[in-house]
Every structure is written in structure tokens, then in C-alpha cells.
Image (cartoon, helix red, strand yellow):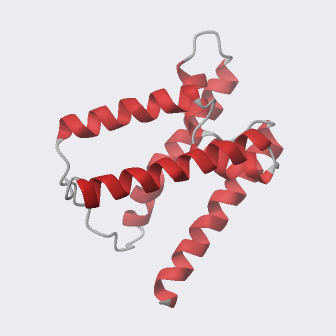
Amino acid sequence: MIAYVLPALAGGALIGASAAMFLLLQGRIAGISGILGSLLRAGASPARRFGDAAFLLGLLGGPWLLVALGVAMPPIRIATPWPLLILAGLLVGYGTRLGSGCTSGHGVCGMARLAPRSFAAVATFMAVAIATTFVVRHVLGGL
């Protein structure tokens, strides 16, 4: 059991530390959808684009760094059809715009700042995730 708890604890601490550092150093919330949107938005300053790109590259490069350091990664198995994955991604993107942020922005940063809308957003994320999991596994018989 401890073999599963320590990596999760370390990962959570690193996520919290990176969100705190981003807020302290950049004065911005480490919401991934907002950072990606800022990177793609026309008119952003070169310094902001560089910072956003560095943050996202760090997120994407983390697993590659672990592999380069010899850390064994769990196998990835995706059994969901591609059209369903694309639809899910589009729905998540729409939801982040509708909810004014993503799980990282609301769940990690917003709740830490005691923002009421983040508590409401996280409660909504969790309720929809629980309902979706129940329907997919128990009503539809798994996909």
C-alpha cells in the first residue's frame, strides 16, 4: 500500500508547489486551459508566450524525463474508440470555457484561494464524473 501512497503524495506536493510558484512568480493561476488559451491568443507578449510554453512543455516533458532517468512507467492501454475520445475532448474543452476554468485551475488553485465559484465547480466536476462512471459501467455495461 505504501508503494502506491508515496508517489501520489509526492505528485500532489509537486503539483501544489508548481501552482504556488506560478502564482508567486507570475502572479497567475496555474489553470492549464487558461495557460493554453493564453498561448494561442493573439496579442500576448513574447515573455508571456515563452512562460506559457515553458509551463506546458514542462508538463508534457515530465514523463519523458522520468523515462530518461530510468523510472519504469506503467503501460498505457486505451481501449476507447478514437471518435469517442475526440468527442470527450471537445466536451471537456467546452466545459472548461463554460465553467471559466479547468480542474487544475479550480481544484488546485481556486480552492486553495477559497474561491466560492471553484468550490461549486469542483462539486460539479465530481458529481458529473461520478454519474458518468456509474452510467458507463453499470447502465451501459462498460465501453
Residue 94 placement, left or right of 97: left
Residue 79 placement, left or right of 67: left
Q: Position of residue 140 (x, y in %)?
A: 21, 53
Residue 76 placement, left or right of 99: left
Q: Position of residue 65 (x, y in %)?
A: 44, 59
Q: Position of residue 51 (x, y in %)?
A: 65, 33
At 63% from the left edge and 39% from the top edge, which residue is drawn? 31
At 42% from the left edge and 69% from the top edge, which residue is drawn? 69
Q: Looking at the rendering, which quadrant does residue 36 occupy?
A: top right
| Residue 41 or residue 120, whichever sits in front | 120
| Residue 92 or residue 20, whichever sits in front | 92
Name above or below for residue 28 compared with residue 9: above
| Residue 136 or residue 51, whichever sits in front | 136
Q: Looking at the rendering, which quadrant does residue 6 occupy?
A: bottom right
Name above or below for residue 65 compared with residue 6: above
| Residue 30 or residue 63, whichever sits in front | 30
Q: Residue lying furthest top in this view?
A: 43
At 22% from the left edge and 60% from the top edge, which residue is drawn? 77
Q: Position of residue 34 (x, y in %)?
A: 61, 30
Residue 89 placement, left or right of 51: left
At 23% from the left edge and 38% from the top edge, which residue is drawn? 84
Name above or below for residue 15 compared with residue 120: below
- Report the number of numbered marks: 0
Q: Residue lying furthest bottom in this view?
A: 1
